[in-house]
Amino acid sequence: MAATEVGQSQTAQRRFAKNALSKPLLTLEREQELARAWADDQDTRALHELTQAHMRLVIAMAYRFRHYGLPVGDLIQEGNVGLMHAAQRFDADRGVRFSTYAGWWIRSQIQDYILRNWSIVRTGTTSAHKSLFFNLRRLRSKIANGTKEALTHTDHQLIGQMLHVSPDDVAYMEGRLSGSDRSLNAPAGGAGEEDAPQWQDLLVGEEESPDDQAICARDTELLRQHIARALEELSEREQKIVETRQLREDPLTLEMLGKQLGISKERVRQIEQQALKKMKEALVASLGQNAEAALHGY
């Protein structure tokens, strides 16, 4: 963002804050009157007065979270969303001040926004991670007495007891907060080395390489050809038994095949074993020791 745009943004934020602080505070009676007018009659003027009077709460909450590297203006916008949610759900008959109720909504909305945008990798995937994200730095500084030393396993257990989370969750979040997002296109050897490999060049893929995929496809096709030639060595009945018993995704049972061929299921089993033996001999003749692998794949 250019310096001019930054200056304009800061000026707009100061103007917004000044306007919010100029709004008078509401008495309990006036607050309840406005809340009921909005809840019962959908009076937008009442909603506007109620929310405007609590805009200072949104600004104060947004500045509490300004150290997470996100624009304060964006945090204020998210806080306003939380304020509107609070106004929509507030029940004046419960005897609770609107600021107390709205504070929870504003903070939750801002925290959710920070978790979604602090990193391109989602951070707060569980309630334990969310609690650690917003409390670990404070507790870590308290335990380490301001030093930058890594936390020990004992420290992880202590923080876990404070926040009611597991030590493993503490260790995980410590690692997440200690790093920052890095472009995969950035040079791995530093910005000054033009010929240095990029970080993405150092990533190891779990899938097979294109070369391995091509070799596997070629070998599979060769095995199919050898098996097809081995099948030609069998009689018509043997071929039918092998194909329906070994080469289909839903093979027939011995009993079902026996009924089709007019023989017993035991005879089908015997013919099947004889046919597989013939195929193995044919494959050994053409593939050698790889015949076992060919039959195992089918």
Image (cartoon, grey):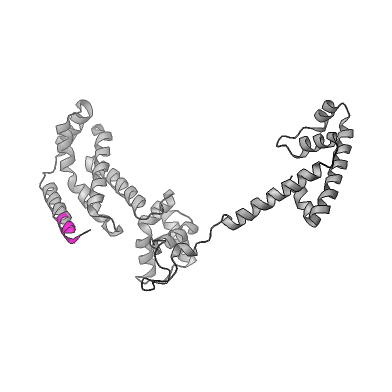
Let me know if residue 97 appears in the view.
no
Q: Main secondary structure of the magenta part?
A: helix
- Where residue 165 appears, as percent x and y from the top left, is 46, 54
Relative to 100, is 152 on the left or the right? right
Q: Is residue 4 magenta?
A: yes
Please tell me which residue lies in front, 86 or 110.
110
Identify the residue at image location x=86%, y=34%. Answer: 268
Let me know if residue 172 appears in the view.
yes
Quarter-wise, where is residue 53 in the image? top left
- Where residue 168 appears, as percent x and y from the top left, is 50, 58
Q: Quadrant of the N terminus?
A: bottom left
Please tell me which residue lies in front, 292 or 183.
292
- Where residue 74 appears, as percent x and y from the top left, is 25, 50
Q: Quadrant of the C terminus?
A: top right
Please tell me which residue lies in front, 249 or 194.
194
Quarter-wise, where is residue 194 in the image? bottom left
Compared with residue 254, is residue 213 higher up or lower down, i.e. above or below? below
Compared with residue 213, is residue 180 higher up or lower down, i.e. above or below? below
Q: How many numbered discs? A: 0
Identify the residue at image location x=22%, y=51%. Answer: 73
Region of the chain picked out in magenta, as a range: 1-8
- Where residue 240 appears, as percent x and y from the top left, is 80, 34
Q: Is residue 269 magenta?
A: no
Relative to 253, is 270 on the left or the right? right
Quarter-wise, where is residue 180 in the image? bottom left
Compared with residue 260, is residue 286 higher up or lower down, i.e. above or below? below
